[in-house]
Amino acid sequence: MKNGEFFLRRKLEAIGRALEKLSPLERDCVLCPRRCHIDRTRGQTGVCQTSNQARVSVGLLHFGEEPVLSGRDLQAGARGSGTIFFTGCNLKCLFCQNFQLSWLNEGQLMTDDSLAELMLQLQRKGALNINFVSPTHVILPILRALKIAYRKGLSIPLVYNSNGYDSLEVIDALRGIIDIYLPDLKYVSSDLSRRYSSAPDYFDQARMAIQEMYCQQPDLILDEREVARQGLIIRHLVLPGSADDSVRVLEWIAENLSPGVGLSLMSQYHPCYRAPAELQREITQEEYHQVTQKALDLGFENLFLQPEPFQPDEHLVPDFRRREPFRWKN
Ligand code: SF4
């Protein structure tokens, strides 16, 4: 059997197993830690406001992800991450910069065939990977579409780009399917996760899910172009006034996973949507330095940092109502 056939058979078998295991969960939905117990196959919706079909805002080549996902050098012809922004969200943070999608549910319903076609289109445009943004609540449409897309030639790595509020059972079912896990780890403090995301159990759920992601993809493996083929990159957005909690996030990763995992420390926070009074500012240089210094002290080897200054950066704050939601820097 040739390599390509072996790859296809292995992926299709893993998808088949995942669909068998996860499809029943949708009828009394426990596909994420919200455990809404509603029947999405009958059009009922829970916290994520999504029935059993995916809704998509846009699929595009993204040049602002970590360089190992988007490609290192835009001017030298980086090809971008083939990013699909799903509508709806199971977490709904008050400050979400993608609130047009997560809260306002703006997007188009997609059949499984059209979602598969979108993946293939991005691959034809030269995407380095398929990057599913907010995949947690639409994992079944994604799996069904992948079955179609693989049969039609999809071959680039898959990125699971989630808010971290994932169910262990779902992540376990994705073994052999997802190549690169890109979860957020937003908070350790349950006071913060309750206040900003109405999810006091965020850390307990996210740490179990991320530990399973680490078991599946422990090492960040790059190809000769320094583009990721496999691995785990944990994202952490530093919030105003919460640098101490950020430090706890880093300590947990270093102690429970490894300082060798990919770690992306984001400085791009910008007050959006329903951000409460204490989040109505950018983070300070001191806050970001406290967190990045801690990461260096803990010995993180695969560290991705964002540049200063801490001003709203147009290319990182999208407007999904524009034809081109991002304005890339050249
Ligand atoms: S996926 Fe949606 S409906 Fe299902 S448990 Fe999560 S938030 Fe509720």
Image (cartoon, rainbow, N blue to C red):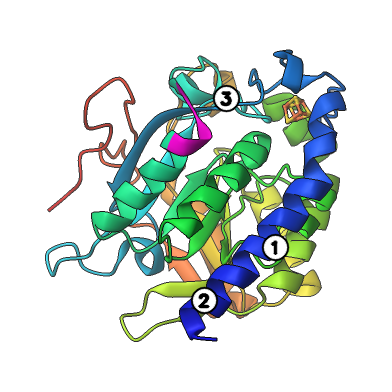
Relative height, residue 155 to residue 146 (above, below): below
Work out whether mark 1 precedes mark 3 in sequence or the reverse, and give the earlier one. Answer: 1
In three-dimensional space, the C-alpha distance between marks 2 and 3, rounded to whole angstroms, equals 35 Å
x and y percentages locating residue 174 in the rendered image = 71, 58
* Foreground pick, 292 / 129: 129
User: Which residues lie in the magenta part?
Assistant: 109-113
Instruction: For marks 1 and 3, give the one nearer the viewer.
Output: 1
In three-dimensional space, the C-alpha distance between marks 1 and 3, rounded to whole angstroms, equals 26 Å
x and y percentages locating residue 104 in the rendered image = 50, 14
Q: Residue at x 78, y 39 (%)?
A: 23
* Foreground pick, 290 / 216: 216
Left or right for 280, reference 320: right
Q: Residue at x 69, y 64 (%)?
A: 13
In three-dimensional space, the C-alpha distance between marks 1 and 2, rounded to whole angstroms, equals 14 Å
Q: Mark 1 points at which residue?
A: 14
Instruction: For marks 1 and 2, give the one nearer the viewer.
Output: 2
Q: Mark 3 points at which residue?
A: 88
Badge 2 crowding class, 10 Å Cα cut-off, few under 14, some 14 to 19, many 20 or more, is few
Q: Residue at x 75, y 14 (%)?
A: 42
**Tag shown at residue 5:** 2
Q: Is residue 234 magenta?
A: no
Circle 3: residue type: Gly
x and y percentages locating residue 12 in the rendered image = 62, 61
Left or right for 309, reference 158: left
Q: Residue at x 64, y 71 (%)?
A: 10
Image quarter for ligand 1: top right
x and y percentages locating residue 187 in the rendered image = 71, 45
Task: Report whether the residue tagged 3 is closer than 8 Å to ligand 1.
Answer: yes
**Res. 320 in view:** yes
Badge 3 crowding class, 10 Å Cα cut-off, few under 14, some 14 to 19, many 20 or more, is many
Image quadrant in which the N terminus is located = bottom right
Badge 1 crowding class, 10 Å Cα cut-off, few under 14, some 14 to 19, many 20 or more, is many
